[in-house]
Amino acid sequence: MADLPIRLRPVVEDDLVMFRRFATEPGLIGLDWRGFQDAQAVARRFAEDGYLGADGGRLMVEVEQEHVAAGVVTWQSGSYATGSYWEIGIALLPEWRGRGIGWRAQAMLCDYLFRHTPVQRIQAATHAENTAEQKSLEKAGFQLEGVVRAAEFRDGRWRDGMLYSRLRDDPWPR
């Protein structure tokens, strides 16, 4: 199967429909479902900065030939004692998963962030049982740092997570 050409683009108002779905449809974003969220929060954030803020943001993952949004990549700032980093994430609609879009979108987001911000480190976390995302992160140039025990409360219990990182000087994915 040939790779579908994709691009990252800024969020437009029509994309808020997808974000509202993520907030109100159980299971649509898979293991990341955290219960019902305020569906109007997406419009408030969009009105504030179009999801392009100094501390984080979102870009749409668009399948170019079809001009359709397949999902969204996100980033938010974090810091350690003497340095800051970006934490990235991705949510693809179910019909676009398993098609090689996720790892490429995450690699493209890293390229964008390394080109336009001075951070040395980008990190991503995923669920211990999400082997597809673990493979995707590795393909996008991330290295496993380890297990984060009891990292999140989901579906009635505390669960482990896997922490990955990519540094500015790491080899770029092929």
Image: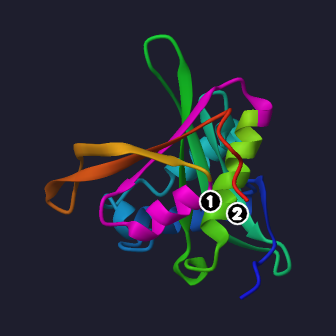
Q: Quadrant of the C terminus?
A: bottom right
Quarter-of-image position of residue 173 = bottom right
Of all residues shown, which one is farthest toward the top?
A: 82
Callout 2 secondary element:
strand
Q: Quadrant of the N terminus?
A: bottom right
Task: Say if 168 sits above or below 21 in the image.
Answer: above
Dot label at residue 61: 2
Quarter-of-image position of residue 118 = top right
Q: Is residue 15 left or right of residue 155?
A: right
Q: Position of residue 146 (x, y in %)?
A: 34, 44
Of the residues shown, which amino acid type is indicated by label 2? Val
Q: Which residues are magenta?
A: 115-140
Of the residues shown, which amino acid type is indicated by label 1? Val
Q: Residues within 10 Å of mark 1 (few under 14, many from 20)?
A: many
The residue at which mark 1 appears reads as 72
Q: Position of residue 24 (x, y in %)?
A: 41, 67
Q: Is residue 138 magenta?
A: yes
Type of colouring? rainbow
Q: Residue at x 57, y 83 (%)?
A: 95
Q: Is residue 113 left or right of residue 143?
A: right
